[in-house]
Amino acid sequence: MIEVYFATNRKVEAEGAEPAFGNAFNESGPHTLRFGSAAVRKRRGEYSVERIDLAPETLVEGASEKEVLGSKQIFETLRERMQSENIDVICLIHGYASDMESALARAAELKDKYRVQGREPLAFVFSWPSDGAMAPLISYYSDRDDARASGLAIARAFLKLRDFLIKIGRERHCEQSIHLVAHSMGNYALRHAFQAIRGELGGRLPQIIDNIFLMAADEDDDVFEHDHKLRLLPSLAKAVHIYYSRGDRALMISDRTKRNPDRLGAEGPRIRDNIPRKISLVDCRDVDEAKGDLSNHQYYRLRPEVVADVNQVLSGKTPDEIAGRAYIHDDRSYRIKPKAKRGKARK
């Protein structure tokens, strides 16, 4: 069984022994958060949720000492495990058309496949209320609106973590790392979360995150040119890694049929002259196809070469030290090389 921790601003449709979550915002508003954990089972390469436990939450107006906070319980559990097991945390912000169970399953898959110096990380997912459907236009625009509105909730989760770390004191920090993975439209949600954090903290951004991975980002390709987008995102982490592919069919559809600007996850940043050294560009055009993925949009979890690349990043290797890459000087990027198939000679 794979353990996954979560925060969500989805509507809680049922509490108790078997909580259920809908594809609408929490009744108290899109900024409202609930925390918990889930058990996910892996069978024949597929991941399915077996149990969800919602952390108890009791808010008492004017009497904070009597409050029960789900965030505090989950953060303390993570801190204790990180410290006692000497392991990092992978946090996922999922993309378009994902219900609660598929979000938990995706996080479990990353925990199962991603490694930090050979060690399995803990998994945490922020699940915003995407529709969990693939209707060509209606669901896409609905999800985009929901991703934008969820930025404040994601920011609140980050700020709750910051406040938790401040309150427990430096001597109780676990000294392990937190890594963030944003996939597809989750990058658009991340943009609005980041702007909400900036609005709250101004220029005093805490560097809580080690690595931020922007995977197949359904985000504008000029996002690192503007302060109101993600130009200042590197201040939040030690390093930012952009994985992209021009063969990503999901982003082609986003570009051509949804009237979006060129996508970051298709060709990388539009202008590369002023990209900070903290940002690495990783071209996945040769490793974007995978069995069962007709869109070439899921390589971050389905292609062994990409998973191996990520694992080397998580293990602390610098961009030029990572095996399986080639540096493309004119493009200022690294390109992941496909693994040679057995029985076929290398070209």
Image: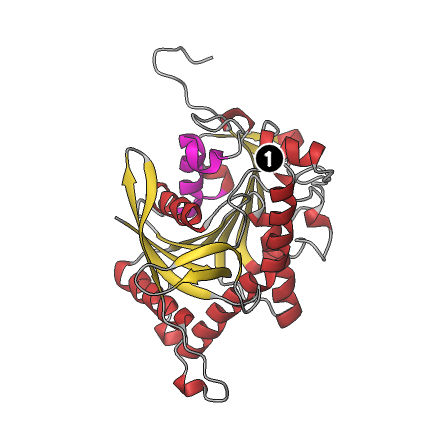
Q: Is residue 310 magenta?
A: yes
Q: To which residue does mark 1 refer? A: 333
The quadrant holding residue 151 is bottom right
Q: Looking at the magenta stretch, what is its main secondary structure? A: helix
Q: Dot 1 lies on which element? A: strand
Q: Is residue 329 magenta?
A: no
- Residue sitting farthest toward the front: 14
x then y, percent, for residue 235: 60, 59
Which of 102/171 is in front? Answer: 102
Which of 136/345 is in front? Answer: 136
From the viewer's perspective, tell me whether residue 262 is left or right of residue 324: right
Residue 178 showing in the rendered view: no
> Is 116 situated above or below 28?
above
x then y, percent, for residue 234: 60, 55
The residue at the point 58 percent across, 54 percent down is: 190
> Is 76 situated above or below 127?
below
The residue at the point 65 percent across, 52 percent down is: 145
Please state the extent of the stretch shown in magenta in the rendering.
Answer: 298-318
Q: Identify which amino acid the numbered label 1 is placed on.
A: Ser
x then y, percent, for residue 199: 66, 68
- Which colour assignment does the render follow? secondary structure
The quadrant holding residue 85 is bottom left
From the viewer's perspective, tell me whether residue 165 is left or right of residue 190: left
The residue at the point 53 percent across, 45 percent down is: 95
From the viewer's perspective, tell me whether residue 314 is left or right of residue 223: left
